[in-house]
Image: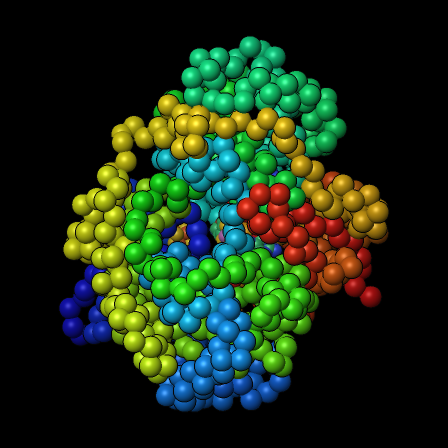
């Protein structure tokens, strides 16, 4: 037995925690993978999912060779081919598409399977290649586009407070955020604050694992959060607790925002949100007297018609209380806005011949079915599983099933999406390739050093596109840059927060904290908006959820469905891991006892959750963890293991008010016994 080697890497998954990990390698094999004990945010722990990473990497269903479809689209029958054959066929088909329809008929559909700057969505691996071909652009708007747009409207940046500073808060409000499932590393900082006397409040239609641990839980109807925030502000201002000095010196629009606040007495907020008026008044009074108060909003409350506006209102809240100037106060959302890397050097959008249209990740069905000019004729699916993840599943499948569409899927596993591929290319997993990461819940950059050689014929996405470029005879030299060179170009930023962070240093240390000021109070003296002030919303402060406002639909489909993060899977990843599937149990939907009784339904029964777009089968769980009027399920279940569909069968392709995000939690359904 050879000696053990420890290789530092990073979890690539779409999770705010951006963990640093240590792979133990013996005789060329990864034998152990653990959280890095030296990383201040990871502190030695991974999570229920990623603890099974190596087991998953060795699963029988791993894709190890290129394949060509032999059955009908959607059937999932493939035959092994060589890389040579695969590249030849792709090159020919792409050349035909470009000749007949122009480059924009190609849609590179990047998902969030890895957030790596080299292999994944952050850097859009292959982007240079697609720029040279003149392909359509792609907006990865499925995750946090609405919230980011709301943050930017108020603050000029999507970056909120440093989540580590939650430890200094005296009151923490977790708003549409379930970290004990969706990224538990922030919990240590929450607990540190509580040890120092802070109170914890959760705002969620569901009494989640996190809400169960809170001192107080408010359960609004989905999509009504902005009205709740306005009601709380009404109480704060009623108590005279606004920070006039901060508002005068560092905010814009206070007179108008104040008028809007006056329009939301707690009684009105209670009526809209379904939260008892006493709870609103009590929390408003507590916020009024507690400095600093920290909010943490992640994705839950932005996946509604008014998701952008909701985040804008929340980002404005600490301007009213003045908490933006206090360590431990403000709003934690994402830290991505603070990452000042040289992304332009990585993307090389200057290689495009001219402007191109931009397709929306959240609207794949629309993009494939509503014939654009030119229609989409070639689709590259890169680290994405839209047949499971994207709204309006039936439209997505109909689009993917188009016979005149040439689809290439770069994958590790035989997903619901892969079943529609013409050509499948085998992709490496994180411990088999190099990458550079941020964490959108902290302020460290991380380097992921490959620990082992790829199995079978798997290739990193960067290498796949280098080979494809060569096969197509493209002579733009930057298409052939090595992974290390790409990383160095990305790190070539002269912004003071990232200056001096070199690849050598990252490789040696594994991770480096960006040199942000200490303490980090990005909005203490105003914001990054053109005015330099926090731009308070002047007119629009609440956009009701679309499917609640639609009276006719609400009558037909009385329940509001939320489909949030499952504990055992990360989006659809791990949805094929036998042990995690066993722990998760089958796709379930939870209903309040009153709603179950009104339908004559009992716990454990098989039900159909449906609306006019489609439906999915689930096991019913009857529990008062869910407020009346709400049905709660989880994302991430593979359709092929769940009777052919999942929660996205009932979700619409509509966009949010700002940012063009998806509306997962703005979905009306009815639940009925499965006949
Ligand atoms: N285990 C696990 N971890 C994950 C993921 C996963 O799939 N599994 N996904 C990862 C990804 S991609 C992301 S983006 C993050 C997301 O992580 P979170 O930001 O925590 O997002 P969700 O779980 O979608 O929703 C959080 C909570 O919001 C609630 N909610 C839904 N609608 C509303 C609303 O209108 N108002 C309010 N106040 N609450 C609402 C839900 O009930 C849920 O408990 O987690 C990441 N981490
Ligand atoms: N109903 C509902 N649906 C949702 C959500 C919700 O809250 N409710 N949340 C949404 C959110 S927040 C997100 S971010 C999206 C995510 O949606 P997707 O982008 O589809 O994310 P994943 O399900 O993680 O699937 C990514 C795929 O990438 C593959 N992959 C991973 N790493 C690599 C790699 O290095 N190379 C290659 N080639 N492939 C790789 C994985 O095997 C996996 O099949 O889902 C959204 N869908
Ligand atoms: S999924 Fe999140 S919590 Fe789990 S290891 Fe990855 S970054 Fe850490
Ligand atoms: Mo996400």
Q: What residue is shown at x 83% (from left), y 50% (from top)?
A: 556
Q: In which quarter of the image is the N terminus?
A: bottom left
Direction front: furthest residue: 354
Task: Please indicate whether residue 145 sits to the left or right of residue 562 in the image.
Answer: left
Q: Which of 637 and 584 is in front in this view?
A: 637
Task: Please indicate whether residue 632 sits to the left or right of residue 524 in the image.
Answer: right
> Where is 235 relative to 508, above or below?
above
Q: Nearer the viewer, residue 630 or 256?
A: 256
Q: What residue is shown at x 65% (from left), y 56% (from top)?
A: 653
Query: What is the x, y in percent for residue 658?
Result: 58, 43
> Where is 631 relative to 294, above or below?
below
Query: What is the x, y in percent for residue 94?
Result: 47, 79
Query: What is the x, y in percent for residue 237?
Result: 58, 15
Q: Which of 540 and 423 is in front in this view?
A: 540
Q: What residue is shown at x 71% (from left), y 27% (from top)?
A: 270
Q: In the picture, residue 483 is in which quadrant?
A: bottom left
* Total marks in image: 0
Q: Nearer the viewer, residue 138 or 362?
A: 138
Direction top: furthest residue: 240
Q: Which colour scheme is used?
A: rainbow
Q: In the picture, residue 585 is in which quadrant?
A: bottom right
> Where is 39 relative to 136, above or below?
above
Q: In which quarter of the image is the C terminus?
A: bottom right
Is residue 38 in sight in this rendering?
Answer: no
Query: What is the x, y in percent for residue 98?
Result: 48, 77
Q: What residue is shown at x 44% (from left), y 54% (from top)?
A: 14
Is residue 482 in sight in this rendering?
Answer: yes
> Where is 624 relative to 294, above or below?
below
């Amino acid at each position: 037995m050879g000696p053990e080697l420890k290789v530092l890497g990073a979890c690539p998954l779409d999770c705010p925690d951006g963990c640093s990990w240590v792979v133990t390698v013996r005789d060329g094999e990864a034998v152990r993978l653990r959280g890095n004990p030296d990383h201040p945010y990871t502190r030695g722990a991974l999570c229920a999912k990623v603890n099974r990473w190596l087991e998953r990497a060795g699963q029988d269903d791993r894709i190890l060779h290129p394949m060509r479809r032999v059955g009908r689209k959607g059937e999932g029958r493939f035959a092994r081919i060589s890389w040579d054959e695969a590249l030849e066929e792709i090159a020919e088909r792409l050349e035909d598409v470009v000749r007949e329809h122009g480059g924009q008929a190609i849609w590179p559909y990047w998902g969030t399977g890895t957030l790596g700057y080299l292999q994944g969505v952050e850097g859009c691996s292959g982007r240079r290649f697609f720029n040279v071909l003149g392909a359509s652009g792609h907006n990865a708007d499925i995750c946090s586009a609405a919230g980011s747009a709301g943050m930017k409207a108020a603050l000029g940046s999507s970056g909120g407070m440093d989540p580590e500073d939650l430890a200094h808060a005296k009151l923490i409000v977790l708003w549409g955020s379930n970290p004990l499932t969706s990224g538990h590393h922030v919990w240590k900082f929450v607990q540190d604050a509580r040890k120092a006397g802070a109170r914890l409040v959760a705002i969620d239609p569901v009494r989640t694992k996190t809400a169960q641990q809170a001192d107080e839980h408010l359960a609004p109807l989905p999509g009504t959060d902005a009205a709740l925030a306005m009601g709380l502000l009404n109480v704060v201002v009623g108590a005279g607790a606004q920070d006039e000095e901060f508002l005068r010196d560092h905010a814009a629009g206070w007179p108008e925002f104040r008028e809007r606040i006056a329009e939301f007495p707690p009684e009105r907020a209670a009526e809209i949100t379904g939260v008892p008026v006493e709870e609103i008044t009590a929390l408003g009074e507590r916020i009024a007297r507690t400095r600093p108060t920290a909010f943490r909003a992640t994705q839950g409350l932005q996946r509604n018609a008014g998701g952008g506006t909701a985040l804008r209102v929340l980002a404005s809240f600490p301007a009213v209380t003045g908490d933006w100037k206090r360590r431990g106060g403000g709003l934690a959302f994402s830290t991505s806005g603070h990452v000042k890397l040289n992304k332009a050097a990585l993307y090389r959008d200057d290689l495009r011949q001219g402007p191109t249209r931009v397709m929306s990740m959240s609207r794949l069905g629309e993009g494939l079915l509503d014939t654009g000019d030119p229609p989409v004729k070639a689709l590259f699916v890169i680290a994405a599983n839209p047949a499971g993840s994207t709204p309006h599943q039936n439209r997505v499948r109909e689009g993917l099933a188009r016979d005149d569409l040439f689809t290439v899927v770069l994958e590790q596993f035989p997903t619901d999406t892969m079943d529609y591929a013409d050509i499948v290319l085998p992709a490496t997993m994180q411990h088999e390739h190099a990458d550079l990461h941020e964490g959108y819940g902290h302020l460290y950059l991380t380097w992921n050093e490959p620990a082992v050689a790829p199995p079978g014929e798997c290739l990193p996405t960067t290498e796949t596109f280098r080979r494809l470029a060569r096969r197509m005879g493209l002579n733009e030299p930057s298409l052939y840059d090595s992974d290390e060179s790409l990383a160095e170009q990305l790190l070539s930023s002269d912004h003071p927060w990232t200056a001096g962070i070199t690849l050598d240093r990252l490789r040696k240390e594994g991770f480096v904290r960006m040199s942000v000021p200490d303490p980090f109070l990005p909005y203490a003296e105003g914001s990054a908006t053109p005015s330099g002030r926090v731009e308070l919303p002047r007119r629009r402060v609440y956009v009701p959820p679309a499917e609640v406002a639609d009276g006719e639909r609400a009558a037909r489909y009385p329940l509001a469905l939320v489909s949030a993060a499952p504990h055992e899977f990360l989006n659809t990843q791990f949805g094929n891991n036998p042990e995690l599937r066993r722990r998760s149990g089958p796709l379930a939907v939870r209903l309040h006892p009153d709603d179950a009784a009104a339908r004559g339904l009992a716990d454990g029964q098989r039900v159909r959750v449906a609306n006019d777009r489609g439906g999915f089968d689930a096991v019913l769980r009857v529990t008062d963890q869910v407020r009346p009027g709400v049905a709660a399920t989880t994302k991430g279940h593979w359709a092929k293991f769940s009777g052919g569909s999942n929660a996205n069968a009932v979700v619409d392709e509509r966009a949010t008010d700002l940012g063009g995000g998806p509306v997962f939690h703005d979905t009306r359904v009815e639940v009925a016994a499965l006949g």
